[in-house]
Image (spheres, coloured by chain):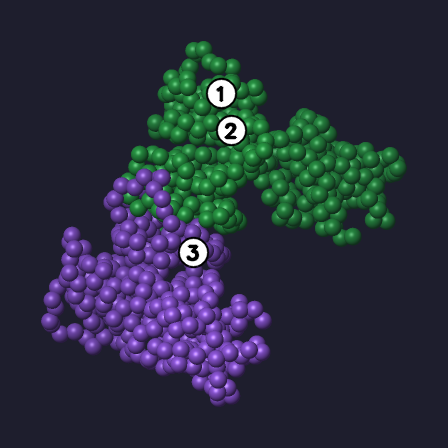
Chain colours: A green, B purple
Amino acid sequence: MTALAYLQKAFLLSKKANSKDIRPNPFVGAIIVDEMGEIIGEGYHKKLGEPHAEVFAIQQALENHKDLSTCTLYVTLEPCSHFGKTPPCSDLIILHKLKKVVIGALDPNPKVSGAKILAEAGIEVEVVHMPELQKLNQVFNINQKFKRPRYILKTATTINGSIADRNGNSKWISNEKSRQYVHATLRNQVDAILTSAKTVLQDNAKLNIRMEGAQEKEQNVIILDKNLSILNNKKLELLYKRSNTKIYLVTHLDYQGPLEEFIEVIQVPLIDDQLSLDELNKQLLQKNICEVLIEGGGKLNASFISKNLVDEMNIFIAPKLLTDPSSINAFSSGIFQEIGEKQHFQLLELIQFDSDVLLRYDVLH
Amino acid sequence: MTALAYLQKAFLLSKKANSKDIRPNPFVGAIIVDEMGEIIGEGYHKKLGEPHAEVFAIQQALENHKDLSTCTLYVTLEPCSHFGKTPPCSDLIILHKLKKVVIGALDPNPKVSGAKILAEAGIEVEVVHMPELQKLNQVFNINQKFKRPRYILKTATTINGSIADRNGNSKWISNEKSRQYVHATLRNQVDAILTSAKTVLQDNAKLNIRMEGAQEKEQNVIILDKNLSILNNKKLELLYKRSNTKIYLVTHLDYQGPLEEFIEVIQVPLIDDQLSLDELNKQLLQKNICEVLIEGGGKLNASFISKNLVDEMNIFIAPKLLTDPSSINAFSSGIFQEIGEKQHFQLLELIQFDSDVLLRYDVLH
C-alpha cells in the first residue's frame, strides 16, 4: 500500500465522528503501520475533550508492539503541539520514538507546529496534500484561519436576482423541493441561522428545521438587532418555547432588562454606525458556534460579502421574473462597483429541483 | 412494426432537411407501407418550393404499385389542404385512394384541414401525438400559431441579475466558453439578431457569428431605432460591408434618404409612443425571418416578456456580483409586479461552462 492509500484509510476512519460531537475540533483519523506494512493501530477523534486520533492509534499499537521505533504513523492532520483540552500529541509520538509521520494536511492554526517539532526530534516527517481533507474540515479550517465562524449564505431569487417584490413579499419564490433542501441540508448542518431584525419582522419566519416525515427541530438564531426591536414583538413565530437552542440578539445597547430564558443578548460596539461583525465573530466562536447560515435580505447579504465574510453561497433560482425595478435585489450595498472588478466565486455544484436551480459557489479568500 | 415505429422512421427522414433551406416550411417526412407492412415509398420535404414529403413518397410507391388502395401513409405532419407554392397533398392522397393516413402532428395553421378532408373522403385517419415533432418544428409552430417569428431571448447576468454596471459596462460578464455557445449555437441557429439602438451605441458590438476555427459569418440584425440614430454613427462595428445579410432599422419615421445597400428601413406605427411589435412581426415573417435572437438591454427584454413575445430564454449566469443597486438589471419594466403572479417558465436544460451556468427556459403560452 502507498502512503496515500494509508492516508485514505485514516481519512475514512476520521469521518466516523459526528461533526457536532467534536466542534470546534476537526475530523482526524490515524493509523500506525509496522515495518511489514501491517496496520497495528488505528483511531479517530470521537468527541470534544476526549483523546485525539493519534492517542487511540498509539494505545492500540502498544498492545502488541512494545517498540514503535520501526513504525510509521499516518495521520490526516498535523499532530497538535500545544496543551488544549488534552496534552500535545507530538510529545506522545516523540516519547514512543516512531520512525516516521505522514501527515495529510497541515493545521491552519499558527499555534500548531507539530510537524516542525517532530522533525526537530529526529522523526522523518512527510506531508501529503489530500484535497478531500480540505473539504472535510472546512469549518475548522475557516475557524482557525480567520478566527470566525464559517459563513454559508443562502438566498432564493427570481431569474433576475430579486428576492421580494417592492412590498417585501417573498413567499414563495422557490418551490417546495428547494425549501426542503434548505431545511434538511443547510439549516440542519449549521450551528445557527443569522438574519436581521428587519427580515424577521417582515417575514415572521420560524427559522427552525422542518423535514418531511420528521418532527420539527429547533435551531439557534442570531439576529442583528441594533435597537432590540424583537423584544417589542412578543408574537413572532420564532419566539416559540425552546428547550435546547437560543435566540441571540446582537446589539450595541447595554440591555439589563428581563429576558426569556432562551434569549441572550450579544453586545458589540458600533463601528461607523454598524454593528461590529469582528466582535460578533469572536463571541460566536466562544459560544462554539462554528458554522452559520446567513438568511437575510439584500443589505445583510451585501454587507457580509463586502467584508469578505462569506465562504459559500447557495443561490436558488426560481423560474420567475420580477421586472419591477423596485423589487428587492438579493445583494444591495449602495457601493459603486465596476463590472471588471476581480471576484472570487467558483461554481461548486449545480442542483436541479424541478424548475428551480441551486447554484453552489465557493468563495475563494 | 407499430404505427409509432413507422412514424419514427418518417421523423428521422424529415430531419434530413436543413432548416434554412425549407423556412418558413416545417420539417416533414412520409412513408408508405403496403398491406404486408413493407415500406414501398418514402420522402421528405427538402427545399422551399419543391414537392412536399407526401408527393415523393407517393411517386416512389407508384413505381412498383399501380394500386395504393391497400396502403397506409405515415406522415409526420397533417397533409396540406390548400394551394401554397405546390398543390394540396390531401388531393393527391384522395386521388390515389390510400386506405389509411397516420399523422404525427396536426398543423397549427387553422387554414390547414387535411385530416378532416381526408376523413370526409372516406380515408381512415389516425393522429398519433409525437412530442419530438413539437420540438423539431417549434419555429414553424410558433410562426403558424401566433403569426410572428419565434423569439429566443439571451442575456448574460451576474449572480444577482445585473447585465452591466451603472455606467453601462458589460464587457465581459460571461466567459469565453459561454460566448462561444452564443455564437455557435444561438446566433448561428436564428435568422436574425434583434436589439435596440441604445444597446448598439453602448456596446458597439459586431453582432456577427464568430466560431473558433471558422471564418466570421454575417448575421442579419434588426435594430429598434425610433429616430434612426444608427444612421448618424457611420463607424459602428456592425456596419461592416455585408454580402448576404441586412441591417433592418425599425422606426416610425418615413425615411426616404439614401441608404447603404445592406440597410433596410422597416416602418411601423407608434402605439403609446412604442414601436408596434405586431406590425414588426408581420413584416419579419414576410421577409422569411422566422426565428429571432433577442440580445438587448433590460427594457427591451422586459418589453418582449410583458407582451408575451418570448418563446425561449437563455440566461447565462456568471460567478460575479454587482451589489450596486444602480447596476442595470436584465429585465426592467417599471411595472409593479407581485411575487405571487403566475408565470410560465419551465426549465429545459442546465449547461455548465466552467463557473458560468446557462439556464434554458421554455416559455409556456
Q: In which quarter of the image is residue B113?
A: bottom left
Q: Where is residue A176 in the image (x, y as percent from the top left)?
A: 48, 39
Q: How far apart are marks 2 and 1 (CA)?
A: 10 Å
**Helix, strand or loop status at disc 2:** loop
**Helix, strand or loop status at disc 1:** loop
Q: Mark 2 points at which residue?
A: A208
Callout 3 and callout 1 share a chain: no
- Res. A28 mark: none
Callout 2 and callout 1 share a chain: yes
Taking B350 as reference, is A252 above or below it?
Answer: above
Q: Where is residue A194 in the image (x, y as percent from the top left)?
A: 47, 30
- Name the residue at 36% across, 73% down: B80
Q: Quadrant of the C terminus of chain B?
A: bottom left
Q: Which chain carries label 2?
A: A
- Amino acid bearing label 1: Tyr
Q: Which chain carries label 1?
A: A
Q: Mark 3 points at which residue?
A: B360
